[in-house]
């Protein structure tokens, strides 16, 4: 099967793009009609477009966070994997930096490249095949499109992020956590095979059994070792219906106690939780558990809540499986229209420190500090996380704690980012790890600490797969 985002559709609504054909070491990228093309280094045979118009550059210098802005000198809209290879090889040879930009839903410039080239993966968005052996997709495919196409065949990737407007290549570069992680690990744990363009422009197919070092490095590798151009991801049979259990608690300890029980016995196919503002001040804590099923195999509601701490209130509802996966897409798209800065903080907390950390944090946090953005809190079993470049606490259970802040007033951005940094340091002091999609300033020294004992391997892989540090400077791991 094939679903392609047509280039024409993609370009519709953007300013007319100036196609660029050459790079001059003095004048930079040079357009076809420019007389300075003489003497420039030609960019050999691109199938797609390399553009430098202000609208394209401005888009590539922005992301969901709207906090960091680094302007590239050109944006490549690849029409083929070959284009990615050509561009990376070219950049590597001429000392330019390159990064793939998926849907640009990072919050702190992670996909941006000051003075370099951004490769926009949205033009590489073909779903090549979906069968019980796996789904083969281009890196620019959105999870929404894969969810739609797979469920039409009675199949589904095991794990989705809460929002489906993210690219497959983007979440495989960071981790990809969601409610089904409680059973299936992260999205990176469900990748079967990748096609990767390394920092020197080599196209390599890798999996757990073939070029395994590159496979291990790239999954959750924050774009440091290669650009994922195609992925085969696991699929499993899809159920048709989602029954949703919401149990509300007055304090964090009761929520996490309930979550720990549910995580241990696996009663829910999906397990998340949130912290919600109470009118008049304070917070309430909600467990969100789901059972996926196909009639007539309906779940037994009493059994699903049996043995959990008694909630202050609860409700049970039901939607189709696909509608559940797609539950916040429209809302996020609406919110994006406002363009509010979004200094998000995502942390993995050690299970044994979570209650204290969250209780302390929430005691001093108000909705003015979060801008009313959602706060997530849910547990994962760290033994299900198999990709070593995704750093999580060294405890059997870790909790994702995410404060998804929204700064309706730009003056709030700075204090929110500072607060993120302080909370990160507090988490780090008790064994917590950053989920690096966050708006937290990080120095190279912070990254050494982040990777800890894994850092020497991380740096050695960089030397092997991207020796000139061509790829993805926006993460700031090896300096700007
Ligand atoms: C509304 C919203 C909801 C979210 N919900 C979740 C959630 O439930 N769970 C979760 O885990 N995350 C969630 N995220 C975070 C999200 O997973 C990351 O921001 C992710 O990086 C976004 O994917 P993207 O396609 O926009 O990637 P981008 O932001 O474009 O890129 C992210 C990083 O990966 C690199 N990259 C992108 N594509 C490739 C590629 N093909 N090869 C190599 N490197 C690449 C980029 O250079 C950059 O460094 C959410 C974000 C938003 C805005």
Image (spheres, grey):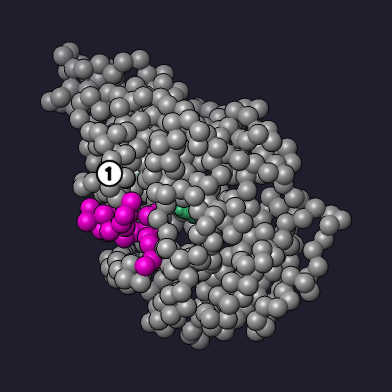
Residue at x 47%, y 44% (from the top left corner): 172
Front-most of residues 13 and 374: 374
Q: Is residue 175 left or right of residue 97?
A: right
Q: Is residue 228 left or right of residue 156?
A: left
The image quadrant where one finds the N terminus is top right
Examine the structure image and report whether residue 326 is included in the region drawn in magenta. no
Where does the image place residue 378, in percent across and percent down from the top left? 54, 67
**Which residue, as the protein is rendered here, is positioned at the far bottom?**
280
Examine the structure image and report whether residue 452 is included in the region drawn in magenta. yes
Where does the image place residue 390, in percent across and percent down from the top left? 42, 52
Magenta residue span: 431-454
**Which residue, as the protein is rendered here, is positioned at the far top?**
38
Residue at x 55%, y 37% (from the top left corner): 192
Where does the image place residue 389, in percent across and percent down from the top left? 39, 49
Q: Secondary structure at mark 1?
A: helix
Give the tally of numbered discs. Answer: 1
Residue at x 26%, y 27% (from the top left corner): 91
User: Looking at the image, can residue 27 be seen?
Assistant: yes
Q: Is residue 308 left or right of residue 228?
A: right
Where does the image place residue 408, in percent across and percent down from the top left? 39, 65
Q: Residues within 10 Å of mark 1 (few under 14, many from 20)?
A: some
The residue that mark 1 highlights is 459
Residue at x 32%, y 33% (from the top left corner): 465
Q: Is residue 28 above or below residue 106?
A: above
Q: Is residue 40 above or below residue 123?
A: above
User: Looking at the image, can residue 52 be seen?
Assistant: no
């Amino acid at each position: 099967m094939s679903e392609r985002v047509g280039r024409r559709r993609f370009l519709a609504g953007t300013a007319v793009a100036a196609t660029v054909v050459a790079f001059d070491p003095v004048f930079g990228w040079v357009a076809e009609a420019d007389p300075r093309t003489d003497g420039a280094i030609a960019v050999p045979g691109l199938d797609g477009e390399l553009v430098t118009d202000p609208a394209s550059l401005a888009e590539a210098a922005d992301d969901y966070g709207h906090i960091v802005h680094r302007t590239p000198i050109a944006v490549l809209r690849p029409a083929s994997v070959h284009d990615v290879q050509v561009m990376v090889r070219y950049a590597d040879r001429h000392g330019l930096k390159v990064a793939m930009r998926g849907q640009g839903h990072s919050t702190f410039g992670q996909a941006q490249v000051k003075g370099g080239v951004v490769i926009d993966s949205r033009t590489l968005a073909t779903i090549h095949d979906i069968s019980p052996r796996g789904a083969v997709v281009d890196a620019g495919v959105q999870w929404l499109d894969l969810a739609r196409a797979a469920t039409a065949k009675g199949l589904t990737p095991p794990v989705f992020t809460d929002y489906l407007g993210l690219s497959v290549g983007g979440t495989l570069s960071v981790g990809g956590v969601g409610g089904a992680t409680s059973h299936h690990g992260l999205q990176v744990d469900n990748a079967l095979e990748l096609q990767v363009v390394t920092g020197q422009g080599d196209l390599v197919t890798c999996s757990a059994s073939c070029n395994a070092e590159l496979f291990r490095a790239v999954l959750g590798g924050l774009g440091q070792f290669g650009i994922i151009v195609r992925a085969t991801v696991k699929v499993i049979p899809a159920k048709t219906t989602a029954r949703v259990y919401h149990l509300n608690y007055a304090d964090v300890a009761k929520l996490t106690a309930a979550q720990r029980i549910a995580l241990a016995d696996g009663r829910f196919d999906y397990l998340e939780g949130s912290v919600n503002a109470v009118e008049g001040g304070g917070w309430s804590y909600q467990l969100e558990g789901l059972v996926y099923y196909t009639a007539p195999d309906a779940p037994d509601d009493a059994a699903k809540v049996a043995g959990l701490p008694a909630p202050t209130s609860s409700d049970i509802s039901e939607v189709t499986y696909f509608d559940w996966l797609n539950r916040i897409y429209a809302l996020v798209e609406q919110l994006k229209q406002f363009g509010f800065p979004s200094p998000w903080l995502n942390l993995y907390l050690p299970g044994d420190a979570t209650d204290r950390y969250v209780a302390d944090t929430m005691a001093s946090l108000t909705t003015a500090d979060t801008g009313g953005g959602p706060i997530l809190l849910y547990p994962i079993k760290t033994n299900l996380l198999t990709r070593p470049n995704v750093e999580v606490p060294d405890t059997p259970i870790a909790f994702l704690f995410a404060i998804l802040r929204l700064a309706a007033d730009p003056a709030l951005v700075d204090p929110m980012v500072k607060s993120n940094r302080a909370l990160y340091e507090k988490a780090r002091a008790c064994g917590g790890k950053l989920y690096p999609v966050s708006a937290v300033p990080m120095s190279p020294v912070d990254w050494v600490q982040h990777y800890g004992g894994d850092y020497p391997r991380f740096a050695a892989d960089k030397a092997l797969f991207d020796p000139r540090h061509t790829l993805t400077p926006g993460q700031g791991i090896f300096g700007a």
